[in-house]
Amino acid sequence: MGDKAKNKKYRILPKKIATLSLDEFEALATALIDRIPERLCTELNGGFLLLPDVKKDGDFYVMGEYVEDEIMGCSIILYYGSFVNFLGDSSPEEWEEELWDTIVHELRHHLESLAGMDDLVREEMAEIEAYYKKH
């Protein structure tokens, strides 16, 4: 294992009540992803992946992530545990809206990468900077 993996600290998170089970979340994600025109998924050769994990970056839950890897290719990862912690017992409609927004957001990262652009990355950096100025 590399140094980064050895130095990570893990802790058990308290159980949260979730409106959607992991299986229900996966079924909803699959249905939403099936609505995306195939041409928008060009070169997304790693596809969409669903992990049960919670992922945080500072004060923020990471709901999804666009990953480019020289060996594994391009993929979009959705973090069910982050949705659970962020949405908890919110309505199924709120879960669907947040999931759709996340899918579209990560797909935008993919499409901008294909076009050699990084507008969304700059928007995110500006939002994070503004957040930390307030807090």
Image: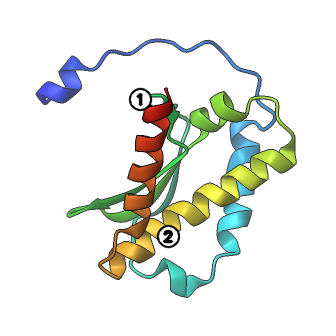
Is residue 28 something one can see in this rendering?
Answer: yes
Split into 4 quadrants, where in the image is the N terminus? top left
Tell whether 64 sits left or right of 25.
Answer: left
* Location of residue 97 (image quadrant): bottom right
Q: How is the image coloured?
A: rainbow
Q: Secondary structure at mark 1?
A: loop
Residue at 81 percent of width and 29 percent of height: 89
Residue at 43 percent of width and 34 percent of height: 133
Q: Residues within 10 Å of mark 1 (few under 14, many from 20)?
A: few
- Spot the residue most to the front: 134
* Location of residue 20 (image quadrant): top right
Q: Residues within 10 Å of mark 2 (few under 14, many from 20)?
A: some
Point out the tag, 1 or 2, that comes first from the N-terminus: 1
Q: Report the number of discs.
A: 2
* CA distance separating discs 1 and 2: 23 Å
Q: Position of residue 132 (x, y in %)?
A: 43, 33
Which of the pair 32/60 is nearer the observer?
A: 60
Residue at 50 percent of width and 41 percent of height: 62
Residue type at the position of mark 1:
Gly
Residue type at the position of mark 2:
Arg
Q: Which mark is drawn over residue 113?
A: none
Q: Which mark is drawn over residue 58?
A: 1
Tell whether 49 sits left or right of 116.
Answer: right
Q: Which mark is drawn over residue 108?
A: 2
Residue at 65 percent of width and 67 percent of height: 33
Q: Position of residue 52 (x, y in %)?
A: 56, 36
Q: Secondary structure at mark 2?
A: helix
- Circle 1/circle 2 CB separation < 8 Å: no
Q: Position of residue 86 (x, y in %)?
A: 66, 32
Q: Is residue 62 above or below residue 48?
A: above
Q: Is residue 135 above or below residue 49?
A: above
Q: Position of residue 118 (x, y in %)?
A: 34, 68
